[in-house]
Amino acid sequence: MIKIQGVYKSFDELEVLKGVDLDVKKGEVISVIGGSGSGKSTLLYCINGIEKIQQGNIIVDEIDVHAKGTNRDNLRQRLGMVFQQFNSFPHLTVLENASLAPRIVKKLKKKEAIEIAKEELNNVGLSDKFDEYPTRMSGGQQQRLAIARALAMKPEYMLFDEVTSALDPELVGEVLDTLRMLSDAGMTMICVTHEIAFAREVSDKIAFFHQGIIEELGTPEQVISNPQKETTQKFLSKVLH
Amino acid sequence: MGMSLFTPLSWNDSGFILTGVLNTVYISLVAITIGTVLGLAVGFLRAESNRVTNTLLGGVLDILRSVPLIIQLILFSTYIGAMGHPLNPFAAGSIVLSLYTMAFMGEVFRGGFESVPQSMVVAGRSLGMSYWQTVLYIRLPIGMRAVFPSWLGVALSVIKDSALVSVIGYMELLRTSEQLISRTQQPLEILLGVGLFYFIISYPLSLYGKYVERKMAI
Protein backbone atom coordinates (compact mmCIF):
# COMPACT_ATOMS: atom_id res chain seq x y z
CA MET A 1 0.00 0.00 0.00
CA ILE A 2 1.13 3.52 -0.79
CA LYS A 3 0.16 6.26 1.65
CA ILE A 4 0.69 9.87 0.65
CA GLN A 5 0.12 12.20 3.59
CA GLY A 6 0.18 16.00 3.49
CA VAL A 7 2.94 16.25 0.89
CA TYR A 8 4.41 19.62 0.00
CA LYS A 9 6.98 20.01 -2.75
CA SER A 10 8.54 23.10 -4.26
CA PHE A 11 11.23 23.85 -6.80
CA ASP A 12 12.95 26.93 -5.36
CA GLU A 13 10.16 29.52 -5.15
CA LEU A 14 7.64 27.51 -7.13
CA GLU A 15 5.27 25.46 -4.99
CA VAL A 16 4.20 22.43 -6.99
CA LEU A 17 2.49 20.21 -4.44
CA LYS A 18 0.51 21.94 -1.70
CA GLY A 19 -0.66 19.26 0.67
CA VAL A 20 -1.47 16.08 -1.21
CA ASP A 21 -3.15 13.11 0.47
CA LEU A 22 -3.78 9.87 -1.39
CA ASP A 23 -3.97 6.17 -0.53
CA VAL A 24 -3.30 3.50 -3.11
CA LYS A 25 -4.29 0.00 -2.10
CA LYS A 26 -2.81 -3.18 -3.51
CA GLY A 27 -4.41 -4.05 -6.85
CA GLU A 28 -5.91 -0.61 -7.39
CA VAL A 29 -5.57 1.41 -10.56
CA ILE A 30 -5.58 5.13 -9.92
CA SER A 31 -5.50 7.66 -12.72
CA VAL A 32 -4.32 11.17 -12.07
CA ILE A 33 -5.74 13.76 -14.42
CA GLY A 34 -5.49 17.54 -14.58
CA GLY A 35 -3.99 20.41 -16.54
CA SER A 36 -0.32 20.65 -17.33
CA GLY A 37 1.76 22.13 -14.54
CA SER A 38 -0.72 20.98 -11.92
CA GLY A 39 1.90 18.78 -10.21
CA LYS A 40 0.73 15.36 -11.40
CA SER A 41 4.09 14.15 -12.70
CA THR A 42 6.01 15.63 -9.77
CA LEU A 43 3.91 13.49 -7.44
CA LEU A 44 5.14 10.33 -9.19
CA TYR A 45 8.77 11.45 -8.89
CA CYS A 46 8.20 12.04 -5.17
CA ILE A 47 6.67 8.60 -4.67
CA ASN A 48 9.84 6.82 -5.83
CA GLY A 49 12.08 9.37 -4.14
CA ILE A 50 13.70 10.81 -7.25
CA GLU A 51 12.46 14.23 -6.12
CA LYS A 52 12.70 15.29 -2.47
CA ILE A 53 9.69 16.60 -0.61
CA GLN A 54 9.62 19.50 1.86
CA GLN A 55 6.78 18.32 4.11
CA GLY A 56 4.62 15.29 4.72
CA ASN A 57 5.17 11.58 4.33
CA ILE A 58 5.08 9.00 1.60
CA ILE A 59 4.93 5.45 2.90
CA VAL A 60 5.38 2.50 0.55
CA ASP A 61 4.73 -0.86 2.19
CA GLU A 62 5.60 0.51 5.63
CA ILE A 63 8.79 2.13 4.29
CA ASP A 64 9.06 5.89 4.69
CA VAL A 65 10.41 6.92 1.27
CA HIS A 66 11.88 10.24 2.36
CA ALA A 67 13.21 9.22 5.78
CA LYS A 68 16.93 9.70 6.29
CA GLY A 69 18.06 6.09 6.53
CA THR A 70 15.87 4.73 3.73
CA ASN A 71 17.70 2.84 1.00
CA ARG A 72 15.88 4.33 -1.95
CA ASP A 73 17.77 2.24 -4.52
CA ASN A 74 16.26 -0.85 -2.87
CA LEU A 75 12.87 0.77 -2.57
CA ARG A 76 12.74 1.63 -6.27
CA GLN A 77 12.87 -2.05 -7.12
CA ARG A 78 9.29 -2.17 -5.83
CA LEU A 79 8.22 0.84 -7.87
CA GLY A 80 8.49 0.46 -11.63
CA MET A 81 8.27 3.69 -13.58
CA VAL A 82 7.62 4.49 -17.23
CA PHE A 83 8.08 7.96 -18.63
CA GLN A 84 6.71 10.17 -21.35
CA GLN A 85 10.08 9.93 -23.10
CA PHE A 86 10.86 6.28 -23.76
CA ASN A 87 14.40 6.52 -22.38
CA SER A 88 15.52 3.31 -24.06
CA PHE A 89 19.23 2.72 -23.58
CA PRO A 90 20.42 3.22 -27.17
CA HIS A 91 23.67 1.26 -26.81
CA LEU A 92 21.90 -1.93 -25.73
CA THR A 93 19.67 -4.33 -27.63
CA VAL A 94 16.06 -4.78 -26.59
CA LEU A 95 16.92 -7.90 -24.60
CA GLU A 96 19.90 -6.19 -22.94
CA ASN A 97 17.73 -3.17 -22.10
CA ALA A 98 15.29 -5.39 -20.24
CA SER A 99 17.84 -7.66 -18.56
CA LEU A 100 20.38 -5.03 -17.41
CA ALA A 101 18.72 -3.99 -14.14
CA PRO A 102 17.80 -7.53 -13.03
CA ARG A 103 21.42 -8.46 -13.64
CA ILE A 104 23.23 -5.54 -12.00
CA VAL A 105 20.66 -4.40 -9.42
CA LYS A 106 19.17 -7.71 -8.35
CA LYS A 107 22.47 -9.50 -9.08
CA LEU A 108 20.70 -12.32 -10.90
CA LYS A 109 22.75 -14.68 -13.03
CA LYS A 110 22.87 -13.56 -16.64
CA LYS A 111 20.86 -16.56 -17.82
CA GLU A 112 18.17 -15.97 -15.23
CA ALA A 113 17.97 -12.24 -16.01
CA ILE A 114 17.60 -13.01 -19.71
CA GLU A 115 14.81 -15.53 -19.03
CA ILE A 116 12.86 -12.95 -17.06
CA ALA A 117 13.49 -10.25 -19.66
CA LYS A 118 12.33 -12.55 -22.49
CA GLU A 119 9.16 -13.38 -20.61
CA GLU A 120 8.28 -9.71 -20.05
CA LEU A 121 9.13 -8.81 -23.64
CA ASN A 122 6.87 -11.63 -24.85
CA ASN A 123 4.06 -10.25 -22.72
CA VAL A 124 4.28 -6.83 -24.37
CA GLY A 125 4.53 -8.34 -27.84
CA LEU A 126 8.20 -7.77 -28.56
CA SER A 127 9.24 -11.41 -28.89
CA ASP A 128 10.57 -10.84 -32.42
CA LYS A 129 12.71 -7.83 -31.41
CA PHE A 130 15.16 -9.28 -28.85
CA ASP A 131 18.29 -8.39 -30.83
CA GLU A 132 17.02 -5.12 -32.29
CA TYR A 133 18.39 -1.77 -31.17
CA PRO A 134 15.67 0.49 -29.77
CA THR A 135 16.52 3.44 -32.01
CA ARG A 136 15.34 1.35 -34.98
CA MET A 137 11.92 0.78 -33.43
CA SER A 138 8.73 2.83 -33.41
CA GLY A 139 7.75 4.94 -30.41
CA GLY A 140 5.04 2.46 -29.51
CA GLN A 141 7.52 -0.40 -29.54
CA GLN A 142 10.02 1.60 -27.49
CA GLN A 143 7.36 2.45 -24.94
CA ARG A 144 6.37 -1.21 -24.67
CA LEU A 145 10.04 -2.01 -24.16
CA ALA A 146 10.16 0.56 -21.36
CA ILE A 147 7.19 -1.17 -19.71
CA ALA A 148 8.78 -4.61 -20.05
CA ARG A 149 12.08 -3.25 -18.73
CA ALA A 150 10.34 -1.96 -15.61
CA LEU A 151 8.32 -5.17 -15.19
CA ALA A 152 11.46 -7.31 -15.40
CA MET A 153 12.34 -5.97 -11.94
CA LYS A 154 9.11 -7.59 -10.69
CA PRO A 155 7.83 -4.41 -9.06
CA GLU A 156 4.85 -4.30 -6.70
CA TYR A 157 3.64 -1.00 -8.14
CA MET A 158 3.86 0.71 -11.51
CA LEU A 159 4.00 4.46 -12.01
CA PHE A 160 3.10 5.72 -15.48
CA ASP A 161 3.94 9.31 -16.34
CA GLU A 162 1.97 10.36 -19.42
CA VAL A 163 3.27 7.35 -21.30
CA THR A 164 1.25 8.02 -24.45
CA SER A 165 1.86 11.77 -24.73
CA ALA A 166 4.95 11.54 -26.95
CA LEU A 167 3.43 8.95 -29.28
CA ASP A 168 2.01 9.40 -32.75
CA PRO A 169 -1.78 8.98 -32.50
CA GLU A 170 -1.82 5.67 -34.34
CA LEU A 171 0.63 4.16 -31.80
CA VAL A 172 -1.31 5.13 -28.67
CA GLY A 173 -3.59 2.09 -28.89
CA GLU A 174 -0.87 -0.54 -28.60
CA VAL A 175 0.54 1.06 -25.47
CA LEU A 176 -2.89 1.47 -23.86
CA ASP A 177 -3.59 -2.20 -24.65
CA THR A 178 -0.45 -3.10 -22.72
CA LEU A 179 -1.61 -1.04 -19.74
CA ARG A 180 -5.05 -2.68 -19.91
CA MET A 181 -3.41 -6.10 -19.86
CA LEU A 182 -1.42 -5.09 -16.78
CA SER A 183 -4.45 -3.82 -14.92
CA ASP A 184 -6.36 -7.02 -15.81
CA ALA A 185 -3.46 -8.98 -14.33
CA GLY A 186 -4.00 -7.14 -11.05
CA MET A 187 -1.01 -4.78 -11.09
CA THR A 188 -1.24 -1.80 -8.77
CA MET A 189 -0.89 1.27 -10.97
CA ILE A 190 -0.79 5.02 -10.73
CA CYS A 191 -1.29 6.53 -14.17
CA VAL A 192 -0.76 10.20 -14.83
CA THR A 193 -2.62 10.56 -18.09
CA HIS A 194 -4.46 12.75 -20.55
CA GLU A 195 -6.38 9.80 -21.95
CA ILE A 196 -9.66 10.46 -20.14
CA ALA A 197 -11.58 7.68 -21.88
CA PHE A 198 -8.89 5.19 -20.98
CA ALA A 199 -8.77 6.44 -17.40
CA ARG A 200 -12.52 6.05 -17.07
CA GLU A 201 -12.35 2.52 -18.42
CA VAL A 202 -9.52 1.00 -16.32
CA SER A 203 -9.38 3.04 -13.12
CA ASP A 204 -10.78 2.20 -9.75
CA LYS A 205 -10.31 5.79 -8.73
CA ILE A 206 -9.62 9.05 -10.50
CA ALA A 207 -7.78 11.93 -8.85
CA PHE A 208 -8.28 15.35 -10.40
CA PHE A 209 -5.26 17.56 -9.74
CA HIS A 210 -5.53 21.33 -9.76
CA GLN A 211 -2.83 23.78 -8.69
CA GLY A 212 -0.93 21.33 -6.54
CA ILE A 213 -3.77 19.68 -4.68
CA ILE A 214 -6.18 16.85 -5.35
CA GLU A 215 -9.34 18.78 -6.03
CA GLU A 216 -11.59 15.79 -6.49
CA LEU A 217 -11.13 12.08 -5.83
CA GLY A 218 -13.53 9.25 -6.50
CA THR A 219 -14.71 6.55 -8.84
CA PRO A 220 -14.73 7.33 -12.58
CA GLU A 221 -18.51 7.69 -12.36
CA GLN A 222 -18.16 10.30 -9.65
CA VAL A 223 -15.28 12.33 -11.02
CA ILE A 224 -15.71 12.08 -14.78
CA SER A 225 -19.41 11.46 -15.27
CA ASN A 226 -20.63 13.55 -12.38
CA PRO A 227 -17.96 16.03 -11.23
CA GLN A 228 -18.86 18.14 -8.22
CA LYS A 229 -16.24 20.90 -8.32
CA GLU A 230 -16.38 23.68 -10.83
CA THR A 231 -12.66 23.34 -11.71
CA THR A 232 -13.19 19.67 -12.53
CA GLN A 233 -16.19 20.47 -14.69
CA LYS A 234 -14.25 23.14 -16.55
CA PHE A 235 -11.25 20.87 -17.14
CA LEU A 236 -13.39 17.99 -18.37
CA SER A 237 -15.43 20.17 -20.69
CA LYS A 238 -12.17 21.31 -22.27
CA VAL A 239 -10.63 17.86 -22.76
CA LEU A 240 -13.83 16.01 -23.66
CA HIS A 241 -14.83 18.71 -26.22
CA MET B 1 89.63 8.43 -53.67
CA GLY B 2 89.67 10.29 -50.36
CA MET B 3 87.44 9.29 -47.46
CA SER B 4 84.21 11.29 -47.49
CA LEU B 5 83.19 13.00 -44.29
CA PHE B 6 79.65 11.74 -44.88
CA THR B 7 78.48 8.14 -45.22
CA PRO B 8 75.32 7.62 -47.26
CA LEU B 9 72.15 6.01 -45.95
CA SER B 10 72.36 2.22 -45.99
CA TRP B 11 70.50 -0.84 -44.73
CA ASN B 12 72.80 -0.80 -41.69
CA ASP B 13 70.83 2.23 -40.51
CA SER B 14 67.53 0.36 -40.40
CA GLY B 15 68.04 -0.79 -36.82
CA PHE B 16 68.63 2.82 -35.76
CA ILE B 17 65.55 4.01 -37.64
CA LEU B 18 63.48 1.19 -36.15
CA THR B 19 64.50 2.33 -32.66
CA GLY B 20 63.16 5.78 -33.53
CA VAL B 21 59.94 4.32 -34.92
CA LEU B 22 59.38 2.15 -31.83
CA ASN B 23 60.17 5.00 -29.45
CA THR B 24 57.62 7.21 -31.23
CA VAL B 25 55.00 4.49 -31.00
CA TYR B 26 55.94 3.81 -27.39
CA ILE B 27 55.72 7.37 -26.06
CA SER B 28 52.51 7.96 -28.07
CA LEU B 29 50.86 4.90 -26.56
CA VAL B 30 51.94 5.93 -23.06
CA ALA B 31 50.61 9.48 -23.51
CA ILE B 32 47.34 8.35 -25.12
CA THR B 33 46.72 5.73 -22.41
CA ILE B 34 47.53 7.96 -19.43
CA GLY B 35 45.91 10.97 -21.07
CA THR B 36 42.72 9.01 -21.72
CA VAL B 37 42.47 7.69 -18.17
CA LEU B 38 43.18 11.10 -16.60
CA GLY B 39 41.00 12.79 -19.22
CA LEU B 40 38.08 10.54 -18.27
CA ALA B 41 38.45 11.53 -14.63
CA VAL B 42 38.82 15.22 -15.45
CA GLY B 43 35.95 15.17 -17.95
CA PHE B 44 33.68 13.45 -15.45
CA LEU B 45 34.62 15.93 -12.71
CA ARG B 46 33.91 18.84 -15.00
CA ALA B 47 30.56 17.44 -16.07
CA GLU B 48 29.56 16.79 -12.45
CA SER B 49 31.07 19.55 -10.33
CA ASN B 50 29.81 22.95 -9.32
CA ARG B 51 30.89 26.19 -10.90
CA VAL B 52 33.84 26.94 -8.58
CA THR B 53 35.62 23.62 -9.09
CA ASN B 54 34.79 23.83 -12.74
CA THR B 55 36.36 27.25 -13.17
CA LEU B 56 39.53 26.23 -11.34
CA LEU B 57 39.87 22.98 -13.23
CA GLY B 58 38.99 24.68 -16.49
CA GLY B 59 41.70 27.27 -15.90
CA VAL B 60 44.41 24.65 -15.46
CA LEU B 61 43.26 22.80 -18.54
CA ASP B 62 43.13 26.03 -20.54
CA ILE B 63 46.78 26.70 -19.71
CA LEU B 64 47.80 23.20 -20.74
CA ARG B 65 45.93 23.53 -24.00
CA SER B 66 47.02 27.07 -24.83
CA VAL B 67 50.77 27.00 -24.16
CA PRO B 68 52.58 25.40 -27.10
CA LEU B 69 53.70 21.86 -26.34
CA ILE B 70 57.30 22.60 -27.27
CA ILE B 71 57.47 25.33 -24.61
CA GLN B 72 55.92 23.07 -21.99
CA LEU B 73 58.48 20.39 -22.79
CA ILE B 74 61.47 22.70 -22.52
CA LEU B 75 60.13 24.46 -19.42
CA PHE B 76 59.37 21.24 -17.61
CA SER B 77 62.60 19.40 -18.34
CA THR B 78 64.73 22.48 -17.62
CA TYR B 79 62.88 23.34 -14.43
CA ILE B 80 62.85 19.82 -13.04
CA GLY B 81 66.61 19.54 -13.83
CA ALA B 82 67.33 22.87 -12.14
CA MET B 83 65.38 21.68 -9.09
CA GLY B 84 67.90 18.87 -8.77
CA HIS B 85 65.61 16.10 -10.05
CA PRO B 86 66.78 15.53 -13.59
CA LEU B 87 64.53 13.13 -15.45
CA ASN B 88 65.51 11.12 -18.49
CA PRO B 89 63.98 12.45 -21.71
CA PHE B 90 61.47 9.61 -21.93
CA ALA B 91 60.10 10.22 -18.41
CA ALA B 92 59.96 13.99 -18.80
CA GLY B 93 58.45 13.70 -22.27
CA SER B 94 55.85 11.17 -21.11
CA ILE B 95 54.72 13.36 -18.24
CA VAL B 96 54.32 16.50 -20.33
CA LEU B 97 52.76 14.74 -23.32
CA SER B 98 50.35 12.82 -21.05
CA LEU B 99 49.17 15.96 -19.28
CA TYR B 100 48.83 17.77 -22.58
CA THR B 101 46.77 14.85 -23.90
CA MET B 102 44.69 14.82 -20.71
CA ALA B 103 43.76 18.46 -21.21
CA PHE B 104 42.28 17.74 -24.64
CA MET B 105 40.75 14.38 -23.71
CA GLY B 106 39.13 15.98 -20.65
CA GLU B 107 37.12 18.34 -22.85
CA VAL B 108 36.20 15.51 -25.21
CA PHE B 109 34.93 13.29 -22.40
CA ARG B 110 33.17 16.13 -20.64
CA GLY B 111 31.17 16.66 -23.81
CA GLY B 112 30.47 12.94 -23.88
CA PHE B 113 29.14 12.82 -20.34
CA GLU B 114 27.04 15.92 -20.92
CA SER B 115 25.55 14.52 -24.11
CA VAL B 116 23.69 11.81 -22.20
CA PRO B 117 20.17 13.07 -21.43
CA GLN B 118 19.41 13.35 -17.72
CA SER B 119 16.09 11.58 -18.33
CA MET B 120 18.01 8.43 -19.30
CA VAL B 121 19.88 8.53 -16.00
CA VAL B 122 16.61 9.02 -14.12
CA ALA B 123 15.22 5.99 -15.95
CA GLY B 124 18.20 4.00 -14.67
CA ARG B 125 17.70 5.22 -11.11
CA SER B 126 14.01 4.34 -11.29
CA LEU B 127 15.06 0.74 -12.04
CA GLY B 128 16.96 0.70 -8.75
CA MET B 129 20.44 1.45 -10.13
CA SER B 130 22.78 3.35 -7.85
CA TYR B 131 24.41 6.61 -8.91
CA TRP B 132 27.63 4.81 -9.84
CA GLN B 133 25.79 2.10 -11.73
CA THR B 134 24.19 4.76 -13.91
CA VAL B 135 27.66 6.22 -14.52
CA LEU B 136 29.14 2.85 -15.42
CA TYR B 137 26.31 1.29 -17.41
CA ILE B 138 24.58 4.31 -18.94
CA ARG B 139 26.57 7.54 -19.03
CA LEU B 140 29.98 6.05 -19.77
CA PRO B 141 29.01 3.75 -22.66
CA ILE B 142 26.54 6.18 -24.25
CA GLY B 143 28.73 9.24 -23.79
CA MET B 144 31.93 7.57 -24.98
CA ARG B 145 30.30 6.29 -28.14
CA ALA B 146 29.17 9.79 -28.95
CA VAL B 147 32.70 11.22 -28.70
CA PHE B 148 34.72 8.34 -30.12
CA PRO B 149 35.55 10.20 -33.36
CA SER B 150 36.82 13.21 -31.37
CA TRP B 151 38.84 10.91 -29.12
CA LEU B 152 40.46 9.38 -32.17
CA GLY B 153 41.24 12.85 -33.53
CA VAL B 154 43.04 13.80 -30.33
CA ALA B 155 44.92 10.49 -30.29
CA LEU B 156 46.09 11.05 -33.87
CA SER B 157 47.37 14.52 -33.13
CA VAL B 158 49.23 13.18 -30.09
CA ILE B 159 51.10 10.72 -32.33
CA LYS B 160 52.15 13.62 -34.54
CA ASP B 161 52.89 15.97 -31.63
CA SER B 162 55.14 13.34 -30.07
CA ALA B 163 57.78 14.44 -32.60
CA LEU B 164 58.29 17.54 -30.43
CA VAL B 165 59.65 15.42 -27.57
CA SER B 166 62.83 15.31 -29.68
CA VAL B 167 63.69 18.81 -28.41
CA ILE B 168 64.45 17.45 -24.94
CA GLY B 169 66.60 14.66 -26.33
CA TYR B 170 64.23 11.71 -26.64
CA MET B 171 65.34 9.43 -29.44
CA GLU B 172 62.06 9.23 -31.27
CA LEU B 173 61.69 9.09 -35.01
CA LEU B 174 62.38 12.74 -35.77
CA ARG B 175 65.51 12.90 -33.66
CA THR B 176 66.97 9.70 -35.09
CA SER B 177 66.33 11.04 -38.54
CA GLU B 178 67.96 14.39 -37.68
CA GLN B 179 71.06 12.49 -36.61
CA LEU B 180 70.99 10.44 -39.77
CA ILE B 181 70.61 13.61 -41.82
CA SER B 182 73.67 15.22 -40.24
CA ARG B 183 75.68 12.09 -41.03
CA THR B 184 74.39 11.35 -44.50
CA GLN B 185 73.40 14.79 -45.77
CA GLN B 186 70.36 13.19 -47.37
CA PRO B 187 67.56 15.22 -45.79
CA LEU B 188 65.08 14.80 -48.62
CA GLU B 189 65.00 11.00 -48.62
CA ILE B 190 64.99 10.75 -44.84
CA LEU B 191 62.34 13.38 -44.12
CA LEU B 192 60.12 11.97 -46.88
CA GLY B 193 60.46 8.55 -45.25
CA VAL B 194 59.59 9.97 -41.83
CA GLY B 195 56.60 11.82 -43.24
CA LEU B 196 55.44 8.62 -44.94
CA PHE B 197 55.67 6.78 -41.64
CA TYR B 198 53.39 9.26 -39.87
CA PHE B 199 50.99 9.10 -42.80
CA ILE B 200 50.90 5.30 -42.74
CA ILE B 201 49.99 5.33 -39.04
CA SER B 202 47.55 8.21 -39.10
CA TYR B 203 45.61 7.82 -42.32
CA PRO B 204 44.10 4.36 -41.72
CA LEU B 205 43.15 5.43 -38.20
CA SER B 206 41.37 8.53 -39.46
CA LEU B 207 39.60 6.45 -42.12
CA TYR B 208 38.52 4.08 -39.37
CA GLY B 209 37.24 7.04 -37.36
CA LYS B 210 35.13 8.24 -40.29
CA TYR B 211 33.80 4.71 -40.77
CA VAL B 212 32.76 4.44 -37.12
CA GLU B 213 31.22 7.89 -37.23
CA ARG B 214 29.13 6.91 -40.25
CA LYS B 215 28.11 3.66 -38.63
CA MET B 216 26.98 5.35 -35.45
CA ALA B 217 25.11 8.09 -37.27
CA ILE B 218 22.20 5.78 -38.15
Image (spheres, coloured by chain):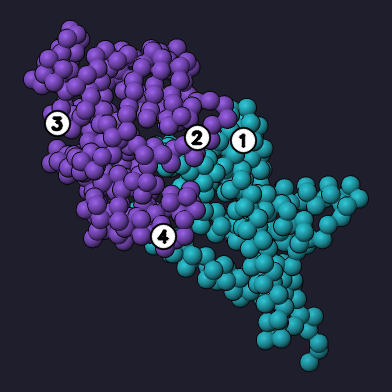
Chain colours: A purple, B cyan
Disc 4 packing (10 Å; few <14; some 14–19; many ≥20): some
Q: Do tags 1 and 2 sit on the same chain?
A: no
> Which residue is depicted at the point 34% across and 14% down?
A212
Say the numbered circle drawn on residue A112. 4
Tell me the distance, in whole angstroms, between the alpha carbons under discs 1 and 4.
46 Å
Asked if disc 3 and disc 2 are in contact, CB closer than 8 Å, the reply is no
Tell me the distance, in whole angstroms, between the alpha carbons under discs 3 and 2.
33 Å
Q: Earlier in the sequence, mark 3 or mark 2?
A: 2
- For mark 3, give the secondary structure: helix
Disc 2 packing (10 Å; few <14; some 14–19; many ≥20): many
> Which residue is depicted at the point 14% across and 31% down?
A201
Disc 1 packing (10 Å; few <14; some 14–19; many ≥20): some
Q: Which residue lies furthest to the top in this view?
A: A230
Q: Is residue B117 visible?
A: no
- Can you identify the residue that label 2 sits on? A72
- Can you identify the residue that label 1 sits on? B58
* The N terminus of chain A sits in image quarter: top left
- Can you identify the residue that label 3 sits on? A201
Left or right: B182 as drawn, with respect to A214? right
Chain name for mark 1: B
Chain name for mark 4: A
Q: Which amino acid does label 4 sit on?
A: Glu
Q: Nearer the viewer, residue A221 or A235?
A: A221
Q: Which of marks 3 and 4 is nearer the N terminus?
A: 4
Q: Do tags 2 and 4 sit on the same chain?
A: yes
- For mark 4, give the secondary structure: helix
Q: What residue type is labelled 2?
A: Arg
Could you say which quadrant of the image residue A96 lies in?
Answer: bottom left
The x and y percentages for residue B99 are 68, 49
